Image (cartoon, helix red, strand yellow):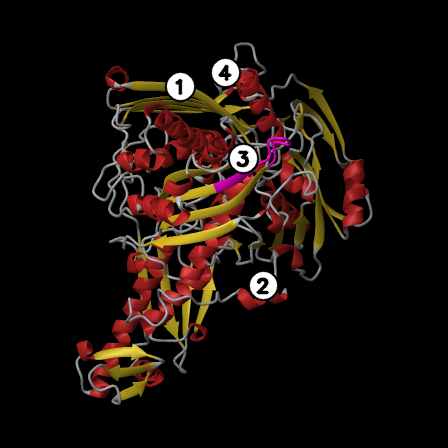
Amino acid sequence: MAEHTLVGHRVPRIDSLDKATGQARYTADLTLPRMLYGKVLRSPHAHARILNIDASKAERLRGVKAVVTGRDTAGVRWGVFRYTRDQQLLTGDKVRYIGEDVAAVAAEDEETAMEALELIEVDYEVLPAVFGPLEAMQEGAPQIHDHAENNINIHVPIEVGDVEKGFKKSYHVREDRFVDSEYTYCQTEPYAVLVNCDLSGNLEIWTPNASPHTKAKALSNLLEMPLTKVKVRRICTGGAFGGRSDIFPGEFIAALMALKAARPVKLVYTREESFTSVRQAHSMIVDLKTGVRKDGTLLANEIKVIMDGGAYSSTGPIATSVPFLVWEETYRLPNVRFNGYRVYTNKPVRGMYRCHGRAFLGGLGMQLDMIAEELGIDPVEMRLRNALRTGDTQATGSKIISCGLSEALQQAAEKSGWKEKRGKLPFGKGIGMGANGMMVGFPMGIRGGSSAMIKFNEDGGATLISGVVDTGSGNDSMVVQIAADVLGLKMEDVNLVSADSEITPLDQGAYSQAAAFVSANAAMAAAIDAREQILNIASDMLDATVEELGLRDGYVYMKERPERNIWMGKAIRKALMDDTPIMGRGSYMPKIDQTREWVSNPKGQQAGTFSFGAVVAEVEVDAETGQVRVSNVTGAHDCGFAINPMAVEGQLEGSVASGGVGATLLEEHYWDGGQMLNASMLEYKVPLSVDMPQITPIIVESMDPEGPFGAKEAGLWGSMNMFQAIGNAIYDAVGVWIKDFPITPDKVLAALEERNRD
């Protein structure tokens, strides 16, 4: 890629200075004239029928401008799919978890709003509650939703091949159960929303989000307003990790209050509310059965997972499916049966997460090592033997068009010194491996693609207009880097207008790992379109063919005679004078099977492409205290092509923190019935800088034929394979398997004591 001046090079992000100096503005930083402050009254009960709400005293309190309850809504329910619409975002009849939104107040100041909440009287009929998925599935358990028999929210069944025959042919069969507890996103920025309502009834909404177009459409449905009147504006986001991709009660409630008061309303959650009343990650109970040949080749898998989904569907079908999809995106599975159950309980709602599936993917990756040991096979060789390769087809029908998984496995093993260390380190020190694939752009209907436009100022500067969303990973900088490279401009010469549902074209948003593949493809196409227009105009001015010309440093030049050139601004101005202004347009829709559906038809091309990664973790285990410290991590990721290697490495390092030290060793919630006991940054443990290991990132480039310059996603390589790597390393260190995530000191000590008794 030597011909590129920017793409493929390490460049600072365009938002670096703003964020480093504190100039970046987040939702809670915004203030509008005549702005009111919102507060929400929440349920103290895990399950109760609402008999009556009397808000008359609150409405009469001086300074209160709006009080809303379920009676102020149109009764429209939310769910990602039509068949999962089960949540009234401001409930009117029933509460199903502690902390559910019951009423809200908008007042001149926060103190008045809080005082008004105390004046709202709610009569409840407390109902029996159920807090675990196994109990919720039993006959006679409290019914949380009338439509869900045995409280089963979603059942995803997938079967490929002849599973029973596969087990019969297997040389070795192993069965295990893995479990994990609930955990949360713990974004640095508390959830916040600001809504402005103008005299024409248009709503402007600022809130951290992963897809303004998706959020605007959902809110227009919920509020029964035309989409043209709902405008989700761009705003900086202080952490996402999958937790900004749903529709939340807060933005709906703030919109109701703004409409009722005809004034702007800002609602900022407390840290406790940000833990309990937005979204959390599912807990899981996973039963695994795996059969292999004598050489370790996978012949059969049977997987059953029961997930605690909390009180409502949210992204239920996707959340239930994704761990299995990640598994089939990694290895060849000739015979596989999957039954995924997402179960309603009287706990807060669960959603998608960057570190989704600890017990599932951690368990499968650890079981591979268990089988490898029983067969006397090296775990790296076990993975290489079963790894997907370019040209393979996954179990449910997706074709692999580029794959660097084997290269990632080999490079991570070699760089980490695997052969010299595995099974050879002193007691208390160990090394382990994990690997996974990742979908890049999945079916979302018309919202699965992206479009972009580029316009030019008369001085030659460009404005890129893209729906791309930057939730912290550098997507804004990425599309600017691509456009500037194609147009021969500096990055500072390209202005970006992004993530605004009114101004920018449709974009899928910053989930399904599609920004670098779909959004960037659209931006590149728009830049190429603009480049061709510029060269066509300049060819007449330079008396040359388009093929003889290039763009560099803001000039159009002849490739063979660079001294013959014109300033790009001259071509832009000529186009304006000729009434043919240059406007680049581009779009991209991933080549997927649009008939594929998460539950009813989980077959066909599931994603535009797939990325792959492998990680090797080294740990030190204190057998006296059970404390586990991750000392070194070597990770290799097939991102197709690194548009900005520095940004890719940053994503690799973030995966080690979130999926590794955090999700594998620290993060969990404690409960008393349906009451969360550690809803604070003090008591919910996340990794600090002192907890981080030495990290060696390796970029593997498979040059995807569909990706922009060959690029694919670079954000999730380690978030789902760190579970396996650390779990396997702990076994190598002290000889015990921990099948309950997170792997905390008490579990390590208990396993060591049990082994010593045996």
Closer mark to the observer between disc 1 and disc 2: 1
Q: Residue at x 49, y 39 (%)?
A: 355
Circle 3 or circle 2, nearest the eye: 3
Q: Nearer the viewer, residue 177 or 339?
A: 177
Q: Is residue 314 visible?
A: yes
> Tag 4: Cα neighbours inside 10 Å, few (<14), some, or many (≥20)?
many
Q: Residue 302: which numbered mark, if any? A: none
How far apart are labels 3 and 2 at the CA level?
41 Å
Mark 4: which secondary structure?
helix
Amino acid at circle 4: Asn
Calculate the distance from the C-alpha at mark 4 to the C-alpha at mark 1. 26 Å
Within 10 Å of disc 1 (Cα), the crowding (few <14, some 14-19, many 20+) is few
Rendered residue at 29%/43% (across/down)? 406
Q: Given this view, does label 2 or label 4 mark the residue nearer the observer?
A: 2
- Boundaries of the magenta span: 618-627
Q: CA distance from mark 3 to mark 1?
A: 27 Å
Q: Residue 7 at what x, y percent from top left?
A: 35, 66
What residue is pinned by disc 2?
19
Q: Whole-Å distance between the Cαs marked 4 and 3? A: 45 Å
Vertical relation: 535 (above or below) 43 = below
Q: Which secondary structure, mark 2?
A: helix
* Quadrant where the image shows the N terminus: bottom left
Sequence-first tag of 1 and 2: 2
Mark 4 lies on residue: 150
Say what amino acid the circle numbered 2 marks: Lys
Is residue 291 shown left or right of residue 124?
Answer: left
Please identify, in this view, whether the residue under mark 4 or under mark 3 is nearer the observer. Answer: 3
Measured along the vertical axis of the image, is residue 257 above or below residue 378?
A: below
Residue under label 1, please give it.
Answer: 175
Callout 3: 10 Å neighbours few (<14), some, many (20+)?
A: some
Does the magenta portion include 625?
yes
Q: Position of residue 482 (x, y in %)?
A: 36, 65
